[in-house]
Amino acid sequence: MSNEQQKIQERNDREIVLSYLYDMGEDVLALGESQFPVQTKTLIKRIAQLIKEGKVKEKISGGVLLDLFRYAGMNLKIKTSIKIEDHGKMLSFSEKLRNDYEDTENPS
């Protein structure tokens, strides 16, 4: 297979996999491609093959895809944050703790 044909096949496999992803699946795939590009190409090819063979029938969530990456030995680094609504504002969890601590230290 020529290099051009291989790139077309990889793109087609990726499109097949993308059509099965939901719930942050595209984001997880993009993280995999940026952190483990070679291994992710192999994973995409295998998932696409399973889809074509009819062995994968359900959509794949971001969480399931993340588990699959981890099972394959690729521990993706994901930036996470916890947001809390406080008096109509969205605060990070650390900001909320800091504000609550400052309120208990300096009561009005």
Image (cartoon, rainbow, N blue to C red):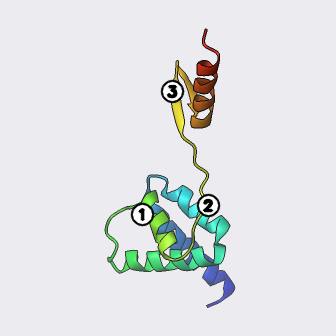
Which residue is located at x 46 percent, y 66 percent?
67
Q: Secondary structure at mark 1?
A: helix
Task: From the image, state whether disc 2 or disc 1 is nearer to you.
Answer: 2
> Is disc 3 surrounded by few (<14), some (14 to 19) or many (20+) residues within 10 Å?
few
Say if 85 sits above or below 26 in the image.
above
Residue under pointer 1 = 64
- Quadrant of the rendered structure where residue 29 is? bottom right
The dot on residue 77 is 2
Which residue is located at x 66 percent, y 89 percent?
2
- Quadrant of the rendered structure where residue 1 is? bottom right
Task: From the image, state whether disc 1 or disc 3 is nearer to you.
Answer: 3
Task: Provide residue 48's location: percent of width, then percent of height.
Answer: 45, 75
- Mark 2–mark 1 distance (CA, rounded to whole Å): 15 Å
Which residue is located at x 54 percent, y 76 percent?
73
Going from N to C along the chain, the mark reached first, 1 or 3, is: 1
- Quadrant of the rendered structure where residue 99 is? top right
Give the quarter of the figure containing the C terminus: top right
> Is disc 2 surrounded by few (<14), some (14 to 19) or many (20+) residues within 10 Å?
few
Left or right: 35 with respect to 17?
right
- Mark 2–mark 3 distance (CA, rounded to whole Å): 26 Å
Q: Amino acid at mark 2?
A: Lys
Task: Provide residue 32's location: percent of width, then percent of height.
Answer: 59, 66
Q: Are the residues at dot 1 and dot 3 in contact (C-beta closer than 8 Å)?
A: no
Going from N to C along the chain, the mark reached first, 2 or 3, is: 2
- Mark 1–mark 3 distance (CA, rounded to whole Å): 28 Å
Task: Provide residue 28's location: percent of width, then percent of height.
Answer: 54, 60
Q: Are the residues at dot 2 and dot 3 in contact (C-beta closer than 8 Å)?
A: no
Residue under pointer 3 = 85
Q: Amino acid at mark 3?
A: Glu
